[in-house]
Amino acid sequence: MDFHGLEALLGLPECRVIAQVCGPQQLDVHLQRREDHLVCPRCQACCSRVKESRPRCLRDLPILEHPVMLWRHMRRFQCAACRHRPWETSETFGEQVKWTERLYTRVREEFLQGCPGSALARRYGLSERTVFRWTCDKSRGGRPRKLGRAMGIDAYARRKGHRDNTLIVDVEKGQPIATFQGRRADEVIAWFKSRPQDELDRVEVVVLDMSKPFFSAVKTVCGDQVHVIDRFHVVQQAVSALDEVLRSVQKQRDHEEAKELKKLRKRWLKSADQLHVDELIARDEWRRRFPALRDTIDWVQDVRQWFDRTDDKPAREALCKLIARASQSAQESLQRVAGTLNRWFEPIIRDIRHRYTNGMTEGCNNKIKLIQRMAYGLRHEHNRQKRIVAWCGAP
C-alpha cells in the first residue's frame, strides 16, 4: 500500500508516513511530524537543524486485520540563536502511553459487550492481561468512587449456598461504588468507617431491603434517619401473603380447579381497567366464592395504591389503617406482614418523601450473576471486584 493510502487510513493529519514494514505478526508504520522546523521555547526563534531522533512505538487499531505498530520518530532540534535543544511534542498522542486512545476505547467497548479477552488479544496484538488491565484496572473499576447523596445496598452470593458479598451502589448515578466480602453488620461497619468522614456526611438516603444487619450497620454509621424501604420490597411482602392464601385455596379444590386458579394468578394484581370483560368476570367469581381471597386481594391493591400518595401525614395515617386491617385479619400470612410493616414503619414512610428505589441495586445484582455465569465462577476476589465495578458502571 502506498504512503498516501496509509495516511488516509490512519487519519493522523499531524504526521506523515516515511516507511512501512509488513511482517508476519504486525504492520510497522514509521511516522514523522510534517513540519520540519520548531519554535524555540526560550528565544522564540525558528529551529530547523535536527540534532538527533529517537523512535517511540505506539499500538494502534489494525488495518486489514493486521495489528499495527506506529513508530513515531521524535526529533530534537538545536536553536542557532541560544543553542537550546528542544524536543518536538505531539498533540495527537499522550506523553507516556504506548497505545492510542482509539485503540483503548475500542478494546474496552468490545470487552464490556461480551467479547472474550483472548480473542481481543489476538485481534489487536495485545496480551490477555493487558486487555483485562485496560478494562478493569485502568478504567473506572480501578479508581475508588466516592459516596453519593443516595446509596443502595444489597447482598449477592459468591457461590450458590456459600457466603455472600455486599454491593454498594450510587442510586442517582446508577453506578456501583464498591463490593466487598461479607454481609454481617460488623463487616459493613468496617467498610463504611474506612471511608473519609466528609463522604459519610454527604449521605442522606440509604435504600435497602428489610435486612437487619444492613439496617443496624447503616444506623451505627449514618444515624437512624437515612433508611428508606422502597416500594418493591413492601409490595413483595404483600404479594407473598397473597400467594400463601392462593395456595391454601388451591389445596381445598380438586386438580382441575387448582390448575385453573393458578393460571389466573397474573390477573389478581391488575386493576379493573387492565382486564378484559371475561377476565374481570372470572376474577369476581373467584372473589365471591372465597371471601379470604377477596379480602387479601383488596388489601394488596390498597397497599399498591398507598405509594401513590404525596403527603407525609395522610400517608402515615393510611399506613396505620392498613396495618390494623392486616393484623385483625383471620389470615396468618396477613398478620405476619402486618408485623413486618409495623417494625419497618418509619423507613417505609420516608419513601413518600424521597421517592428512591432500589431497582438499580437489584439490576446490578442480576448483572453480577450474569458475569459470574459467563466466567464459570470468579474465584479470585480481586478480579471479581474489578470486573463487577467495570461491567456494572457506564462504559
Image (cartoon, rainbow, N blue to C red):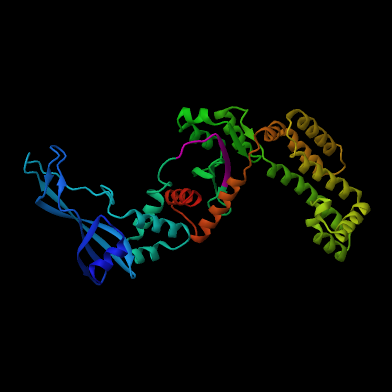
Residue 50 pos. (x, y %): 10, 51
Q: Vertically, is 336 above or below 377?
A: above
Image side of residue 93 versus residue 162, left or right: left
Residue 153 part of the magenta-drawn span: yes
State the image coordinates of residue 249 (x, y, percent, origin top left): 86, 54
Determine whether, in the image, residue 313 is placed left or right of residue 391. Answer: right
Q: In the figure, is residue 349 to the left or right of 361?
A: right
Question: Who is closer to the viewer here, 82 or 326?
Answer: 82
The answer, for residue 42, to whether it is visible in the render is yes
In the figure, is residue 194 to the left or right of 41? right
Check the image and name the residue furthest to the right: 289
Could you tell me which residue is drawn at 54 percent across and 44 percent down? 174
What segment carries the magenta color?
A: 145-155
Q: Is residue 125 visible?
A: no
Q: Position of residue 178 (x, y in %)?
A: 48, 42
Q: From the viewer's perspective, is residue 150 above or below residue 74?
A: above
Please name the residue shown 29% across and 59% down the image.
59
Q: Is residue 75 magenta?
A: no
User: Residue at the location (56% across, 40% down)?
Assistant: 172
What is the count of numbered marks? 0
In the picture, residue 13 is in which quadrant? bottom left
Q: Which image quarter is the N terminus in? A: bottom left
Q: Position of residue 90 (x, y in %)?
A: 24, 49
Viewer-closest of 177 and 352: 352
* Residue 68 vs residue 202, the one in the foreground: 68
Q: Nearer the viewer, residue 61 or 338?
A: 61
